[in-house]
Amino acid sequence: MVNESLLRIRDLKLHFRTTKGVVRAVDGVRFGLGHNEAVVVIGESGCGKSSLAKAVLRLLPRNVQTYSGEVYLDGTDTMQLDEEAFRRQVRWVKMSMVPQAAMNALNPVLRVGDQVAEPMMVHYGVGKDEALAQARRMFEHVGVPVDFMHRYAFELSGGMRQRVAIAMSLVTAPALIILDEPTSALDVLTQANIMNMLKRIKDEMETSFILITHDIATSSELADKVGVMYAGQIVEVSDAFRFFSGPLHPYSQKLMASVPRLRADVEPEFITGQPPSLFGLKPGCRFAPRCPARFGRCDEDPPVYEVDGREVRCWLYEETGTLVEEPQKA
Amino acid sequence: MRSIWAGIREVWRYPSAIVGLTIIFLIVALGVYTVVTLPYNEAIRLWRGGEEVWSESPKTARPIWYDWLTRRSLSRTIVLNSRDGQAVKTVETLGEDAQTISLVFSFDYPYDTFPQEVVIFFTAQFDQKTPHASMTWRTPDGREIRLGQVSLRPTETYRLALDTRLARRLNNVLPQIALFADPDSETPVPVKGTYELEILVSTFENDADVDAKWVAYGEVHGLAGTDYRRRDLMVALQWGTPIALAFGLLAALGTTLTTMFVAAVGVWFGGWVDALIQRVTEVNMVLPLLPILVMVGTFYEHGRSIWVMLGCVIALSIFGGAIKTFRAIFLQVREAPYIEAARAYGAGNGRIIARYLIPRIIPVMIPALVSGVPVYVFLEASLALLGLGDPVLPTWGKVIDDARSQGAVHSGHYYWMLQPALLLMLVGLGFAMVGFSLDRVFNPRLRGL
């Protein structure tokens, strides 16, 4: 049984309307995580990882076609809250986010200290001094010198800005933080620094993380659990240890085989073909056209099976797993 | 915010900005000086006053600096009042009920031209029997001319030019010329020197008293000249300054801020709100501002004031064309990642508009604001010229309107129209120069031009 005490997502859909048709960026996601747990969501570019983050935090663009499903956060169904209630009760109170390209996510006309203090003032109505004191503690936490609080975002280096963005996500001490590719634009040393910092924060502040990335190696440092996303769906959820030693889904297996190994003399593999376009998906398993283990049933939409406390959306586990979710109707 | 201060400091590198700021500084200093030295109520009293307030100044006299343009020294106004001790006053009691009061005015006349008009104002105190005055004029070359005789009411004005008997005696030469002219000269030239006017008043009551004020109106008067109602134009030119600045600044601020806010709201909320704002703006852009203001001004004939007009200007400009400019920038800013980040941390709509959208537009707004000031200063003048100015306040536009309606240019009173026009142009020039420089500082792409 997968631990879903903090966040439980069922059949979450987020479709966009574009001139070319409907993009099914998030299409029936089943996912969850527990308290003080770090989940890494991995997947190729364009598989809907960032859209999943936006769907959870309800940061919807204007061209939304469908937005539905269940999102239980700490026991409350946030999909039932209206926009204003969601803004007041969820955003940055229970759940915060370090957006993709966090380096550009800081207001250029506010000092970074004020910027980090803003959520405190917005949500808890505290005075500016108190909010700044809290921001100061967060700066110390993420390892940015406190006198940088008086600087503007463009006066900081990329790594520093990333840390400021993380400080901002921590300032209200939410139970869950979503990090959307927090290290993708940084050099390797800074990446490692930030990963270590996140690990420390997770222990000290008992926070849960959803870490969205395509960098499997770096994220393995932090992960308690791994979710694999493919073509708008989560195809596998597993604890990190067992995932890295033996993934269940054929896609996960191919993905892991593509990671270069330092110690083993193995050529990294690549997956033939391309991920399906998210316009007008055909019925059947979405990975089937590229799958080496493809067989007859793959023409039908696969259900989710539970195998030893891991969940996988694949027909291969029809025999060994227990059915936990019916295949969704397209 | 700091970049804005840095930008303003950078303005000093542009000579045009320094010139413009100097002009603005001088005009603001004039405005402040005016408000301090000539209080509002006093200015209004003077500007609304008629002959009684302005009895000592000539009609449509040129400014005194006309002297510098001509070689001759033009006549200035001479006022002598026996009540202020500017005449030798002797009282001779002749008997029970009769006395003779003698008032002798003597003054120096150094000018090359004749006065515009000569008037004597009498004030008399008596019970029933009217005093009687007779006047004698003595020129520097020793001639003696008998002026008219007047029975004095409590206040009596003796205009020499209206005394037909005197005119006959002077061979129909205008008295202001005849009294001063050299009889030996072909063309009339005033004799310079000390003149004397003696007024002999016979009273028929013992406690009666008479005073007289002698005024020779000059051809030049005051730093700015006077208008057809004898008003000193300095009052209007000075008070026009704070009014023009206040009107221009308030209108520019009011229109820019409201427009910016409406544009920000439209862009942020998008959808039908934006569509509505854009359509209203497009309709509003087609409507001509000035005719609507003329309509409003005509409609509010009685309650009209410059501040009603200001309100109309701002109200009509809320959905002005500037919305399009601001919208273009806001649309770009709206998609910035930090706006999404702000949404993510739960900032409300108001906070995003105020703290995230609007600060980004300030660099564009400041030059627009500064360049907008003269537009509204001119608008106020245009309204005044169309007869829709404030009926009470002295403004530059009112002066130009008066000058136009009194045919100032046809009768050669160029100063009347040119002085307020020059001030208007100075204001326009000052703000335009600063505005252009600010534009270069805040829009660096223009710098290479």
Image: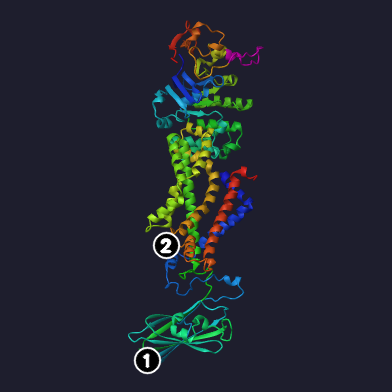
- Tell which residue pokes out farthest to the right in this image: A265
Number of disc labels: 2
- Tell which residue pokes out farthest to the left in this image: B128
Q: Mark 2 lies on which chain?
A: B
**Camera sees residue B319:** no
Q: Residues within 10 Å of mark 2 (few under 14, many from 20)?
A: some
Q: Are marks 2 and 1 in contact (CB under 8 Å)?
A: no
Q: In this view, does B138 lie above or below A12?
A: below
In the image, A83 versus A287, the foreground residue is A287
Query: Which residue was labeled with disc 1?
Result: B98
Predominant SS of the magenta segment: loop
The amino acid pointed to by label 1 is Ala
The disc label shown at residue B190, or none: none
**Camera sees residue B87:** yes
A266 falls in the magenta region: yes
Please tell me which of labels 2 and 1 falls first in the chain.
1
B209 falls in the magenta region: no
Q: Residue B80 in the image: x percent, y percent?
A: 48, 80
- Left or right, A257 with reference to B208: right
The amino acid pointed to by label 2 is Val
Q: Which chain carries label 1?
A: B
- Left or right, A90 with reference to B414: left
Q: Residue at x 45, y 69 (%)?
A: B229
Q: In which quarter of the image is the C terminus of chain A?
A: top left
Q: Is mark 1 on a helix, strand or loop?
A: loop
Query: Which residue was labeled with disc 2?
Result: B392
Q: Is residue B35 above or below residue A35?
A: below
Q: Residue A167 in the image: x percent, y percent?
A: 53, 32
Q: Quadrant of the N terminus of chain A?
A: top left
Q: Tell me the distance, in whole angstroms, between the alpha carbons under discs 2 and 1.
A: 50 Å
In the image, B424 versus A187, the foreground residue is B424
**Magenta residues, as a range?**
A254-273
